[in-house]
Image: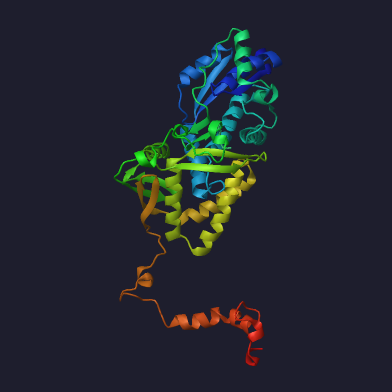
Amino acid sequence: MTTKKNTIVLAYSGGLDTTTAIPWLKEKFSADVVALTVDVGQPGDMEETRRRAIQVGALKALVADGREAFVREFVWPALKAGAVYEGEYPLATALSRPLIARLLAEAAVAEGAFAVAHGCTGKGNDQVRIELGIMALAPQLKVIAPAREWGMSRDEEVEYLRRRKLPTPPAKTTKFSIDENLWGRSTEAGPLEDPWHEPPEEAYGWTASAADAPAEPTYLKLEFAQGVPVAVNGASMTPLALVQHLNTIAGRNGVGRIDHLENRLVGIKSREVYEAPAAVVLHKARRALEAITLAKEQQRFRDMVAQQYADLVYNGQWFSVHRQDLDAYVASLERYVSGTVRVKLHRGASTVVGRKSPHGLYAYELATYDKADQFDHKAAEGFIQVWGLPIKTQARRGRAAGPDPSRRSEETR
Ligand code: ARG
């Protein structure tokens, strides 16, 4: 038990930064290091990652399967809320960080650790998200960010491990910096740092280019219950299976590529290429269902809430009271957002081609131009008189933008 007093739980990805962090933390803090890897659907062999942590000196290496919790507790609320950062980014990386923070905090408490550590640098958003998560859930813990402190280049990190006769992770095979989970893939750096430069095909890993996508469209029937998807083409699916399924189908059709020049919380503009096939299709479909189930004022107001929600997720405030309040609004809003949306996937485009809901506000007898029409045309006349009254009054006082006031007749003065 005495060793536990000096334990640090490290969020371990298996990459060079967090691998170097294991001996670095042990030496600098004379501490035991417990590595925690969270599976949020990223590629890679978790067993191999675990082994690597032990090989470079971790006392223990834990792997947590966070995939179901990620979709149910983080992705679904954000989808329901319509959270898309700056109208482009469905927040894959940003949504995984609070889950990682929660699992880190839980492991630290279970291990009796005094600190947690993460591999984020000082330039990104993720340091903020993880640290605010720890502050919210276990404020007694110290947070250590080795890669923000040590100032080593990648070559120096390799050298650091070699000097200690420790194995180094396989060398990077890409010029990009990539982060992946079930909700999307983010690619930055390398040639993408020139915002004028079109992303090369090798920047993409999940999606076909529109040119290589099948010539025939794919149609999907997506069934929603209270703002979240529950079935595809009549087959009920778990949230995890549904997201995986849509990533495959939409990705194959070239859907889900996003080239975004975004505003980071730390004040930098950065260019990110995202692939989020399931997210793009699901946000679009949910919104289409809202158009038939919500009143106009609800639609207008919900867009403001969606933006608040997206900013809050991006900015690391997942565990805030503000989010609880927004969730309460969204739960109420989505009560009637149930029904089915038909989506066509074709050569990079996803298009909503049909929608229906048992709670629909679309009334055929009001909308139709045929003889089934029940709309009271005569009522429009009085309506327009009253609706137009303020603008008519403004015109009479010479204030409405209209004919040149110098040509106003005496009568209207
Ligand atoms: N810019 C995105 C965010 O802050 C994603 C960053 C992911 N990291 C990467 N190396 N691509 O959420």
In what quadrant of the picture does the N terminus appear?
Answer: top right
> Which of 192 and 16 lies nearest the eye of the viewer?
192
Q: Position of residue 397 (x, y in %)?
A: 66, 84
Which residue sits at x=65%, y=92%?
410
Q: Position of residue 40 (x, y in %)?
A: 49, 31
Which residue sits at x=53%, y=29%?
176
Which residue sits at x=35%, y=68%?
364
- Residue 107 drawn above or below residue 137: above
Q: Is residue 127 left or right of residue 386?
A: right
Q: Is residue 11 left or right of residue 246?
A: right
- Residue 154 drawn above or below residue 101: above
- Residue 290 drawn above or below residue 128: below
Q: Is residue 397 left or right of residue 185?
A: right
**Count of marks overlaid on the render:** 0
Residue extending farthest to the bottom is: 411
In what quadrant of the picture does the C terminus appear?
Answer: bottom right
> Which of 265 and 232 lies nearest the eye of the viewer?
265
> Which of 341 and 321 lies nearest the eye of the viewer?
341
Protein image colouring = rainbow
Residue extending farthest to the left is: 216
Q: Position of residue 48 (x, y in %)?
A: 47, 17
Q: Quadrant of ligand 1?
A: top right
Q: Position of residue 8 (x, y in %)?
A: 64, 20
> Which of 408 and 375 lies nearest the eye of the viewer?
408
Q: Is residue 372 visible?
A: yes
Q: Is residue 249 visible?
A: no
